Structure formats: C-alpha cells, structure tokens
Image (spheres, coloured by chain):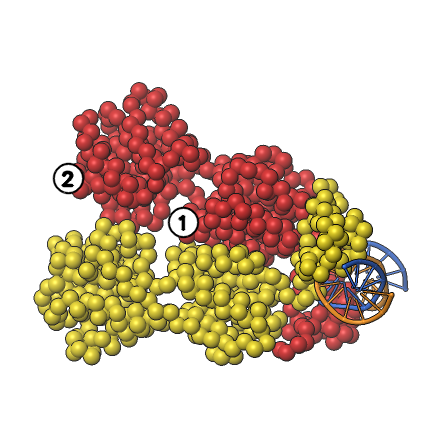
Chain colours: A red, B yellow, C orange, D blue
Amino acid sequence: MPGERNPGIARVAAAAGVSVGTVSNVMHRPEIVAPSTRERVLKAIEALDFVPNTAGATLRQGANRLLGLVVPQILNPFYAAITESIATAAGRRGYALALCVSHDDPEVELAHFEMIAQQRAAGAIVVPLSANEDRLHRLRTVGTRLVLIDRTADEREGCSVVIDDFHGGSIAAEHLLAAGSAQVLHLVNGPLSIPQCRERREGTLSVTSARDIPLEEHTVAEMSIEEGFRIAKHLAGDPRGLPMLVFCTNDQLATGVIRGLEAEGLRVPDDALVVGYGDLELATTASVPLTSVAQPKAEMGSRALSLLLEELDDSSNHQHRSVVLQPKLVIRESAP
Amino acid sequence: MPGERNPGIARVAAAAGVSVGTVSNVMHRPEIVAPSTRERVLKAIEALDFVPNTAGATLRQGANRLLGLVVPQILNPFYAAITESIATAAGRRGYALALCVSHDDPEVELAHFEMIAQQRAAGAIVVPLSANEDRLHRLRTVGTRLVLIDRTADEREGCSVVIDDFHGGSIAAEHLLAAGSAQVLHLVNGPLSIPQCRERREGTLSVTSARDIPLEEHTVAEMSIEEGFRIAKHLAGDPRGLPMLVFCTNDQLATGVIRGLEAEGLRVPDDALVVGYGDLELATTASVPLTSVAQPKAEMGSRALSLLLEELDDSSNHQHRSVVLQPKLVIRESAP
DNA sequence: CTGTTAGCGCTTTCAA
DNA sequence: TTGAAAGCGCTAACAG
C-alpha cells in the first residue's frame, strides 16, 4: 500500500494491449467491443484490481453520480423513514447519497448546500428549514437538480413532495364524529407557528364547522407525552358527555392524553376516543394501540427520488411537478 | 443556466488578473498571498459565483473529502443514533458523508463498498454484516481508511468501536439479584446466533453462577413485544417465589413481558422486576418506565469518527486501536 | 471495431 | 509574492 497510486484506465489498457478508449468502452458500452478484446480487458481489470475513479468521469462530465439529501434530523422516525427509503432506492440505482443533517440550523444547512454543490452532485433532495429561498440558490448555480420535501416548490425551482395535512386533520375529525352524537371535539395541538399544525387544525375545523360541532382547542408548546398527560386533566373535567372525542396532532400527545385520562379514571376507548397523528412505532406499541393518521413516509422518499431521477434522465423536456400525498387513517383500539 | 459550464479557477484567475496558482493559494493558504491580490481574487470569486469543483482536487490528490458510512438499517434507533452522530460530526469537520444502507444483504453491502471505493472516499465507517473479511478488501485496495463498529478489527485492518455486551449482561443481572434473595433469574433472550445475544448471556451467567443462582433461559426467535408477551405466560407460572427477576435482552421483549405479566395479574415492579436492554425511546415512554441497559450510541459514532479522522490526519504514524465502550444501567420503575 | 487525442478543474512543484 | 506548466483519470469525438 505505501505510496503508489492505484492503477488507472491507462495501466489496464497497457496490460490488455489495447487503448484507453477501448477500456472505457468495455465499461460503458461493452456491446460495441469485440468479445475477445472485451475478455482480455476484463481479465486485466481483474488482475490489476482496477477500481475506476469517479473523479475522472465527474470532471469530464461536469456532474457526479451522487445525490445530496438534506434533512433536519435522523432520530425522529419521520425523517428516518424518508432517509431510509431514499438511501435504499438511490443505492439500487447506483447513486451515492450524501447525507446532511441540518439540525434546524440555517447556517449548517447552507454549509451542506455548499458541500453538495462542490461535489457537483447531480441532484439533491431537501427538507428545507425555512421558507428562505436564497440558500437553495447555491445548488442551482452549479446545475444541481432539486426536489423539495414538505414544502411546495414553485415551478421554477423544482419538483416537490408534500403531505396533505389538511386532509389528515379532516379524516381524523370525521372518524371521531362518526362515533356518535358528540357535543364537542377536543383538539390537542402544537404551536400554530408550525405549518403542519396549522394545516391539521384547518382540516379539523372544516369538518366540525360543517357539522356545527364546537371545537375545543388545547395548545401545547411542546408536543410530548408529558404535555399530553397534563392536558388530559383539563379534558377529564369537561362535563359535556361521554365518550369524549380527542384528536391529538401527534402520537406523543395522544399517548400522554390516554395515560392522563386513565389516571383520571376514564377508560379508553370506552369513555374517550383518541386519535393521534404520525403512526409512529409508538402508536403500535402503546398499551392501548393508537388509532392514528399515517403519513406515507417511505413513499415520500421514493417519490422524491423518482422525480429527481426522472429529471436527471431527461433534463431537456422535464416539467417540474408537485406531488401531494394523502395520509390515511389507521384504526386501532383507541378509537375503533 | 442553459448549457454553459460553471466558471473554474481559470476564469476566476482571468477576472482577477492573476494566475490559477494564485487563486488556488487564496483558497488554501491565504496567508502567503499579498492582501491586495487576495482581495482582488476574493472579489472575482464572489462576482462569478465560483463554486470550487472537488473533482479536480480529488483527481489531483487521489482522495476525496468524503467519508462512507455503511449500516444495516436506519430505522432502528440504534443505527439511527450512530448515523446521526457521525453525520453531525462529519459535517462539522467539512466532510461529506456517503450513507449506505445494506439491509442485511451482503451483495448490497459489497456494492456499497465498491461505490465508496470508486468515489475515492478518504475513509469509511462500517457496521459489517458478517465476519466475512473479504468484502472489505475492496476498500483497502484504493487506500480508503476503515473503522469498524460492532466488530473488533484485527490490527491490520483498522480501528474499531465495540460495546461490551458481556458487561451489559452482568450489570443487569447484578442489579436484579441485588433486589433480594431470589431463587432463580429468568433470562429472555434472542437467538444465540446473534453475537450480542451470546455476550449478554455470558455476562449474565458469570454473575448467576458466581452466586449459585440458577439461570432459567427462555429463547425467542424474534425479539419483539409479541414474543415477550407470549413468554410472560410461562414466567408467570414459575412457583419459585416473588418478586420474580427477569432480564430481557432488548427493550421490546421487556415491554412485552411486562404487559404479559400484568395480563396474568402480576404487578411490576411489585411482583416482578424487569430489566431491558438498549434504552430505546420505548423504555422511556412505556407505561411502566423500563430499567434498561443503555448503550452509548451517539458516543459509538463520534468515537468511530474521531478514530477515522485521527488516522486521516496523521496516517504515517497511526496505530490502529480498538475502543470498547461500556454500557450503563438506567434505573427506572420496572426495577428500581 | 479500435486507437488517438483533447480537455474537464485543480494542486503543486519550480522558476522567476 | 506570483506565474507557468505538468499531470491526476476519465470520456467522447474523430479518424482510421
């Protein structure tokens, strides 16, 4: 190993007694090479332990067989699922995937864009931090194609994949209201500064107001089990009849609410129906399995990748598209 | 954007009225460039929206500022945590990270090694699938430095980071036995074909046999909540006194066991003490918070990265090392 | 079907 | 302190 570089295409060519062009052809268009020559080259490649250096090709072609993926986090099953599906599909298609975790820090995100641009990644999938469009510009200047997740891209910038959280909110509400003649629907929601929380609320509201059912809103700063537990005390005091109907905008809250209600002596689903959002593992493993609005996480990833590859394969007459994925209600015991 | 390539170092040089060498120096050793010249170059870089192309440097230098990371999965909080810590640290150090998910398929893993080698990654961190050493060879032939996680590397191949599961098994057993004069310790374990399960068992055994306490072993094929639940019925029938002592080799099993015992009318921790392994989120969020053996997941990642960067920064007189990290018992309600 | 050749963008001597 | 020039390994266009 000391010192000496790996053999390049030239050394292979010499060993096989052919020219470099032929070696290149053997690798990329083997069908145009005479079988006997091909054999000889393949043998030389084998013998020399030749590993093609993508840097050469990248330089020549101006783009790397590499995709960037920028997400806010990895822990957090939502992003983990997206990442996993993208990584799997990218690998299968022969692309390397540069994973970047932005940790909700715009500076970090920008630094990642810079990296991706410098590597001349052919494309990138980004879950952008804020609406700030400027940072993405760095990627565009080097011609890296872009697909956004969780934020609709305008036509010029690229394709995007989003979830219809309005619909998610409405199917949750509908399911709960179908349970009977409720006098009120409780919504346990996170901060409205989060777009997803706003959308889920709107969806819920569209259902309750259409039916003239009052919506009782409970807002928590942190969408955690603890907060859900705390809120449950308030809910339990509501005099307006059982079963109580509760929609929580994530599964942590829902889990906490259920525990809190049980601590107050109510039974789920007998005295209260609870629906969560996200369909995390938590929903499955809870002691009262949770009815929850499932987001097609893996599909988000794979659709994003498809859009990107589509654009890369046919950049000339590609039309940017915005895919909207629909969440689905998964019914379990907490609200059958 | 149509057609034309991005400006290179040469165009910057022309714009600033200097030579390409000077531009390169401005980027890498600004201190040796006269301030006025430096200014001029910086201005040109700005004006042209110049983004350096790493392919050029990679070609010239034979290695890319890129690290590979190969893990079996991302969903699975253990790998997610390792990945997150590596991604974060790598980003901070200015390295791109090529994420590869092998999905327990050796063929896929090999393909990933090939990719990483072709990209001339400077180094790679790998959680190898099997003990098969040959596949890694591909990486070595191109000089990619290697750090293994979860498997001890022999001195020639590189550094490694492993967890001392023997110790993990022993502290779990010790904690349980400290609870009182038990007549038996129950071990709910996964298949012994999994090295980690073997180690945890050995650790447990070392404690019980030292104290002449019989170890009752229950083996499940799948380490799931359901299996834990199922096994609990058997446990509940054991006549040898309460509180029963149960060590489960992962948190899923422990969660299932607790539910199963409760379904049989036993109370945790009053009638049975249960310890899990992994300290997943599940342990925290369970209705009876779980005492569990915590693995230093994030630290595994950061240590692996440190070892790798250390080697990259000083490859000449680097000595490969094997870091063994100790798990710690996190005490919660299931076994106080 | 195969060989030749001109760069792609960058770093790094070596001279000036 | 700066400039000139030699490649790094590869692809693709062209000529044979």
SS class of the residue under badge 2? loop
Q: Is residue A216 left or right of residue B101?
A: left
Circles 1 and 2, Cβ within 8 Å, touching? The answer is: no
Quarter of the image that includes the N terminus of chain B: top right
Q: Is residue B95 left or right of residue B195?
A: right
Determine the residue positioned at 32% across, 48% down: A282
Residue situated in front as seen by the camera: A81 or B121:
B121
Determine the residue positioned at 16% across, 58% down: B269
Chain for numbered disc 1: A
Residue picked out by circle 1: A76
Give the image location of residue B106, x and y in percent.
49, 67
Chain for numbered disc 2: A
Q: Is residue B128 visible?
A: no
In this rendering, the answer to whether A45 lies above or below B101 is below
Determine the residue positioned at 40% across, 49% down: A77
In this rendering, the answer to whether A248 lies above or below B208 is above
Give the image location of residue A237, x and y in percent.
18, 31
In this rendering, the answer to whether A183 lies above or below B131 is above
Q: Which mark is residue A265?
A: 2
Quarter of the image that includes the C terminus of chain B: bottom left
* Badge 1: residue crowd in 10 Å (few <14, some 14–19, many ≥20): some
Determine the residue positioned at 25% across, 67% down: B172
Which amino acid is tagged 1?
A: Asn
SS class of the residue under badge 1? loop
